[in-house]
Amino acid sequence: QVRLVESGGGLVQPGGSLRLSCAASGSIFTIYSMAWYRQAPGKQRELVATITSGGSTNYADSVKGRFVISRNNGKNTVDLQMNSLKPEDTADYLCNVDYAYYIDSERRLVRDYAWGQGTQVTVSS
């Protein structure tokens, strides 16, 4: 199993910055894509940004030019640098990884997804 631990959330004023981090640990053979999602009260969970193992990135239109996703493959971590924050960025931010683990007894690779517990980001004056 994989455990994801997020950190870096908090309260920030509009226009400010925050950096979120997520570390994956456990039985990992490889991690394909890593992503950040967010969910605001009363709203559906939405994809914020993704990054592949090769470093290709994709962003929601609402955060393009303000957020930057990055990862460290050696440490199995993914960060989200959030700049020029707006009140509408307020949400619970969740880390997600698409990974594979190996079952020795069956000699096969299994692909799965894992979610973190979330870290709260509040943008308010």
Image (cartoon, rainbow, N blue to C red):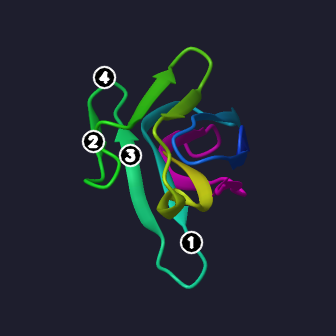
- Element under disc 4: loop
Q: Tell me where residue 79 sits by quadrant.
A: top right
Q: Nearer the viewer, residue 125 or 78?
A: 125
User: Which of the two discs, 1 and 3, labels the residue nearer the N terminus?
Assistant: 1
Residue at the spot of label 4: 54
The CA span between labels 3 and 2 is 5 Å
The CA span between labels 2 and 1 is 21 Å
Q: Position of residue 7 (x, y in %)?
A: 74, 39
Contact check, label 4 and label 1, Cβ < 8 Å:
no
Q: Which residue, as the protein is rendered here, is positioned at the far bottom? A: 42
User: Which of the two discs, 4 and 1, labels the residue nearer the N terminus?
Assistant: 1
Which residues are the magenta region?
98-125
Q: Position of residue 115 (x, y in %)?
A: 61, 56
Question: Disc 2 marks which amino acid?
Answer: Asn
Q: Position of residue 78 (x, y in %)?
A: 54, 31
Residue at the spot of label 3: 49
- Element under disc 1: loop
Residue 58: give its label. 2
Q: Nearer the viewer, residue 20 or 13?
A: 13
User: Which of the two discs, 3 and 2, labels the residue nearer the N terminus?
Assistant: 3
Q: Examine the structure image and report whether residue 97 is included in the region drawn in magenta.
A: no
Q: Position of residue 12 (x, y in %)?
A: 67, 45
